[in-house]
């Protein structure tokens, strides 16, 4: 694990090199995610070396930003385990608990902080056989509330990292077929996507943080990137699309009736610009040995950058307004 910590530390230099080379949002996200995936696989191998071969097949699943291949240096870990249905809690629980805890602790040591909401494989709630996972998704689809929508938003971003990925494939194939017909669930997911408004005022002026250490800034993640991530997920689920990455979801949903070509292009351009702007901001913080964050001061940008930033936030605001208009008063806000 100590050697893995040393390897993980080099991700900072990788980020700096990629930003200097004008890498795209996709390239930046995939590079950092690939390192996390490799660390995860090696930790699983080390755990199996200590514990012996797994008693039943399993899949280690990345969710959240790692699942979407959009991980950053500022991200915490979100993961889970899908177990084969031959799993017997009495005989096998201790093995998988030990494996999950070893991997989660190892990732934390490598700089991927434990999830504040405990959405990790070491939590037995997120370490279940395939049939139990089907029950979780059925519960979220059929008995949706705001808490269920929040959990579903994370777990619909599933991607296999190690093990028998057919377990994840079978789960998501069944669930995605149901999604387009679950109108109440989709209404809650749409409401979830509208929570974080872009920081623009009535006359397209920036709505800035008014106090504290980030006074005079805008949060590019909370009010820019996350709204696009959430919107893309809604469009993909409504169309029954299995893609997980944000840009891939928007590309596949474009022209399906859920999202216009123009709307998809606007959100894709906004996502690319916001991600690139944040990456440059964080690269500067890395060079100055400062803690990295998502807060950018519009006054520190060039006039062209400020105009592009307003255009990106405007694209999100237009899509929010379109969703509100389409749903009328049926959204559970």
Image: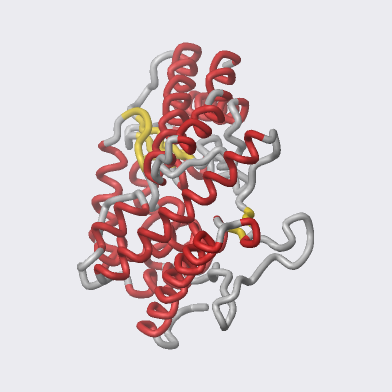
Picture coordinates of residue 60 (x, y %)?
40, 33
Q: Residue at x 65, y 40 (%)?
A: 285
Name the residue furthest bottom: 329
Front residue of 233/181: it is 233
Front residue of 2/62: it is 2
Q: Residue at x 45, y 22 (%)?
A: 44
Picture coordinates of residue 4 (x, y %)?
54, 18
Residue 270 falls left or right of residue 104? left
Q: Quadrant of residue 55?
A: top left
**Rendered-image quadrant of the N terminus:** top right
Picture coordinates of residue 241 (x, y %)?
25, 57
Name the residue furthest front: 303
Please state the total of marks drawn on the protein image: 0
Picture coordinates of residue 196 (x, y %)?
55, 67
Q: Is residue 221 above or below residue 7?
A: below
Q: Quadrant of residue 222?
A: bottom right
């Amino acid at each position: 694990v100590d050697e893995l910590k040393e390897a993980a530390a080099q991700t900072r230099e990788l980020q700096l090199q990629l930003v200097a080379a004008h890498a795209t949002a996709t390239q930046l996200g995939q590079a950092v995610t690939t390192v996390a995936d490799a660390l995860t696989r090696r930790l699983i191998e080390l755990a199996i070396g200590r514990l012996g071969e797994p008693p039943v097949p399993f899949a280690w699943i990345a969710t959240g930003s790692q699942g979407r291949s959009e991980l950053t240096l500022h991200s915490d870990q979100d993961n889970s385990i899908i177990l084969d249905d031959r799993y017997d809690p009495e005989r096998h629980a201790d093995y998988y608990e030990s494996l999950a805890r070893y991997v989660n602790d190892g990732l934390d040591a490598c700089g991927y902080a434990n999830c504040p909401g405990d959405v990790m494989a070491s939590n037995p709630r997120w370490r279940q056989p395939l049939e139990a996972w089907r029950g979780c998704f059925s519960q979220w689809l059929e008995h949706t509330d705001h808490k269920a929508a929040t959990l579903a938003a994370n777990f619909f971003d599933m991607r296999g990292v190690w093990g028998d990925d057919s377990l994840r494939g079978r789960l998501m194939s069944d669930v995605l077929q149901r999604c387009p017909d679950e109108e109440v669930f989709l209404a809650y997911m749409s409401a979830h996507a509208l929570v974080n408004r872009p920081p623009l005022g009535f006359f397209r002026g920036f709505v800035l943080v008014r106090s504290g250490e980030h006074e005079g800034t805008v949060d590019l993640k909370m009010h820019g990137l996350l709204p696009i991530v959430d919107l893309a997920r809604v469009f993909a689920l409504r169309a029954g699309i299995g893609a997980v990455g944000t840009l891939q979801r928007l590309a596949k949903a474009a022209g399906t009736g859920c999202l216009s070509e123009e709307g998809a292009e606007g959100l894709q351009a906004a996502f690319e610009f916001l991600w690139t702007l944040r990456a440059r901001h964080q690269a500067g913080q890395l060079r100055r040995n400062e803690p990295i964050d998502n807060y950018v001061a519009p006054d520190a940008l060039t006039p062209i950058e400020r105009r592009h930033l307003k255009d990106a936030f405007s694209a999100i605001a237009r899509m929010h307004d379109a969703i509100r208009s389409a749903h009328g008063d049926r959204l559970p806000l």
